Amino acid sequence: MADTSRIRPKGGIVVLDFGSQTTQLIARRIREQEVFSVVLPCWTPVEQIRALEPAGLVLSGGPSSVYDPGAPVCDPAVLRMGVPVLGICYGLQWISHTLGGQVRPAESREFGPAVVEILGASPLFAGLPSRQKIWMSHGDHVVSLPEGFRQTGQTETTLAAIEDPARRFFAVQFHPEVRHTEHGREILHNFVFGICGARPNWTRAGFVAESTAAIAERIGGEQAICALSGGVDSTVAATLVHRAIGDRLTNVFVDTGLLRKNEFEDTVELLERRVGLNVIGVRAAGRFLARLAGVVDPEEKRRRIGNEFIAIFAEQAREIGRTSGKPVRFLVQGTLYPDVIESVSVRGPSATIKTHHNVGGLPAVMPLDLVEPLRDLFKDEVREVGRELGLPEEMLTKHPFPGPGLAVRILGEVTEERLAALRQADAIVNEEIRRAGLYQQLWQAFAVLLPVRSVGVMGDARSYGLTVAVRAVTSEDAMTADWARLPADVLERISARIVNETPSISRVVYDISSKPPATIEWE
Ligand code: XMP
């Protein structure tokens, strides 16, 4: 059953994706201006686009050349919809090629910063200086324009902007969506408001009101269930649904025994008392530890944890059905827009480096309809919606924590003793990071327990204890990450406290690898 509780206001901007790494950013930059924007694959049938009644279209960049066999294309009918179009990079080349212009490989590929000279008056560049810093990334360029077009921008080497004002087609060879393009935001603003005449239709208060009404209508008088992870996404999703249907939503929070120090108690307390959710806390540490006995392979750990989680969740759902006399029909999930875009991407699903644990396998086990109220939101929008819902700031700004928890931060077998040691070390890392006022600047900070023993000296005695690696990274989206340059005195306090307060650990090392080539987690 389609999720009719999704909110997609009319009069937004449709971004057709040709596979660029920065396509999502285009939609984000438009939404930052409070206009709804949605990314669809370039081959989306024109009727489907028209059904959204867009105020305008953006055709994204992409890695291909228009002459490549199998190069991505749109239905040319998108250029006859009668709405303004903005082509970016490959989008410009596809428009030119399709309407009879000529595209050729440039003598050299152009990457990085450049300066564009704006030629004459153009509504796309209205109010902006005639020389602007921009960011380029392309191999081909346009050498002759289609009929009706004129050139509006030139860099030292390349034609950089064109337009056909009569048909309201605009196109740039550079990337206005990236921050390095000095006036990118204003260029998109000019397109969205000045050229398309869009109106702000995307505010967090509007989203909360409309999606609550839509969820209430979809779920009606039925029962729903949600698996809380303690993280931002599932909490915001559950809070929205709770607003819509009250305590007919039951939230299950499982103590896998793989959580951080005090996390189970603190999270249940916060969600029940402060947020007012209806939470069932399930203590199941023993079950998970039993399933993990003897397992060292990270993917096998993830698989077993995922399966056990689904088994517990299904038991809880049946129990709720039995006690309420009404079977649970809906499953609430905190799926975000980037996951949705990735699964329909022109580039195809990216190669799996790690399988991420969630409850996605559940509908296969139980006949539940999915409610995914955040399916159209980016992470920063989810935090904003959380603020609108009055969720505590400490919850909204919490670092991400992997579903399989500490199990993927213990290299080798997971045992109760190792969990206890890691939990203690991890708590120290977090306390010291917070005490130094660094928590908000970091994407994540944690400890990893290594199966490496080394010789040390404690008092006058020889020690032969385990090693902990401290990991702290900065990142915007976890796709890439940089190791954090933590002050030496903070590292010193962390190291001293871990060795003093955790007897089985005698050595602390700091991880100075970035992603890529390393990943953030060690497993
Ligand atoms: P990596 O290690 O792939 O991590 O660089 C990227 C982000 O994803 C988190 N992560 C996971 N989250 N289940 C999750 O829910 C997992 O199995 C998992 N593995 C990694 C990681 O903490 C980081 O934020």
Image: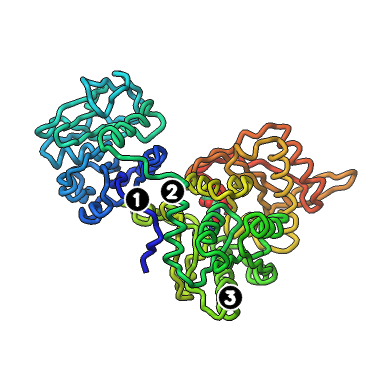
Q: Which mark's residue is nearer the viewer, 1 or 2? A: 2
Question: In which quadrant will I find the N terminus?
Answer: bottom left
The alpha-carbon separation of the residues under discs 2 and 3 comes to 32 Å
Q: Which mark is residue 9?
A: 1
- Kindly indicate whether the residue at mark 2 contacts the one at mark 1 (C-beta within 8 angstroms): yes
Which numbered tag is attached to residue 206?
A: 2
> What's the colour scheme?
rainbow
Residue type at tag 3: Ile
Tell whether 326 sits left or right of 276: left
Q: Could you give the CA–CA distance between mark 1 and mark 2, rounded to whole angstroms?
A: 10 Å
Residue 67: x %, y % from top left? 18, 43
> Where's residue 462, x and y in %?
85, 48
Ranked by sequence position, the earlier of labels 1 and 2 is 1
Query: Would residue 37 appear left or right of 257 to someone viewing this image?
Result: left
Camera-nearest residue between 508 and 202 = 202
Element at badge 3? helix
Q: Which residue position holds label 3? A: 320
> Is mark 2 in CB contact (under 8 Å) with mark 3?
no
Left-right relation of 198 to 246: left
Query: Could you say where residue 400 lies in the image, as x and y percent from the top left?
Result: 58, 50
Q: Does the residue labelled 2 lie within 8 Å of ligand 1?
A: no
| Residue type, mark 2 in image | Gly
Residue shown at 58%/66% (left/top)?
A: 247
Can I make out residue 356 in this image? no
Q: Of the residues shown, which amino acid type is indicated by label 1?
A: Pro
Disc nearer the start of the sequence (2/3)? 2
* In the rendered image, the vertical position of residue 296 relative to residue 515, given as above or below: below
Residue, x 18% and y 40% (percent of image)?
95
Placement of 295 over or under 232, stated as above or below:
below
